[in-house]
């Protein structure tokens, strides 16, 4: 929903609802992405950090690398 339709507010609503069922690294990653696109850099940083913690627990090496890239982008955009 986020990347295709660019409905970041709608994405946030759905993703926050999804948290009541289960959490994983991808959930936090996409929450962070939506916050990043809405220029809420503090929340984006928080969610990317949670995603990173989850990915470490999941031993998801590729997603760890991608999340570090997005953390860098978040810092860059925040100025």
Image (spheres, grey):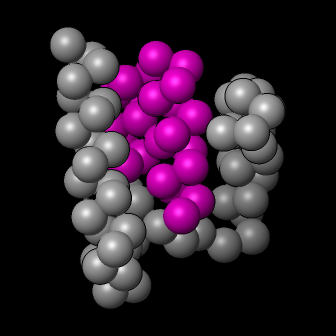
Q: Residue 21 placed where, x, y %? A: 75, 70
Which residue, as the protein is rendered here, is positioned at the far top?
79
> Taking the image as drawn, is residue 3 in sight?
yes
**Which residue is pictured at 66% across the width and 39% down the height?**
3
Count of numbered badges drawn on the protein: 0
Is 42 contained in the magenta span? Answer: yes
Q: Residue 40 placed where, x, y %? A: 45, 21
Q: Nearer the viewer, residue 76 or 40?
A: 76
* Quadrant of residue 58 within the rendered picture: bottom left
* Quadrant of residue 60 within the rendered picture: bottom left
Quarter of the figure with the N terminus: top right
**Which residue is pictured at 32% across the width and 86% down the height?**
59
Highlighted magenta segment, given as a residue range: 26-48
Q: Residue 24 placed where, x, y %? A: 53, 71
By secondary structure, the bulk of the magenta-drawn segment is best described as: helix
Quarter of the figure with the C terminus: top left
Q: Nearer the viewer, residue 68 or 53?
A: 68
59 in relation to 50, above or below: below
**Which residue is pictured at 26% across the width and 48% down the height?**
69
Is 21 contained in the magenta span? Answer: no
Q: Residue 39 placed where, x, y %? A: 46, 17
> Taking the image as drawn, is residue 57 in sight?
no
**Which residue is pictured at 69% across the width and 38% down the height?**
2
> On the rendered structure, is 41 left or right of 20?
left
68 in relation to 39, above or below: below
Q: Nearer the viewer, residue 17 or 65?
A: 65
Which residue, as the protein is rendered here, is positioned at the far bottom?
59
Which residue, as the protein is rendered here, is positioned at the far front?
4
13 in relation to 55, above or below: above
> On the rendered structure, is 2 left or right of 14?
left
């Amino acid at each position: 929903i986020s990347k295709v339709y660019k409905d970041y507010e709608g994405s946030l609503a759905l993703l926050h609802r999804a948290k009541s069922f289960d959490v994983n690294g991808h959930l936090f990653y996409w929450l962070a992405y939506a916050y990043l696109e809405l220029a809420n850099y503090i929340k984006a940083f928080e969610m990317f950090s949670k995603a990173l913690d989850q990915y470490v627990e999941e031993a998801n090496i590729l997603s760890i690398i991608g999340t570090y890239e997005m953390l860098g982008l978040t810092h860059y955009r925040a100025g």
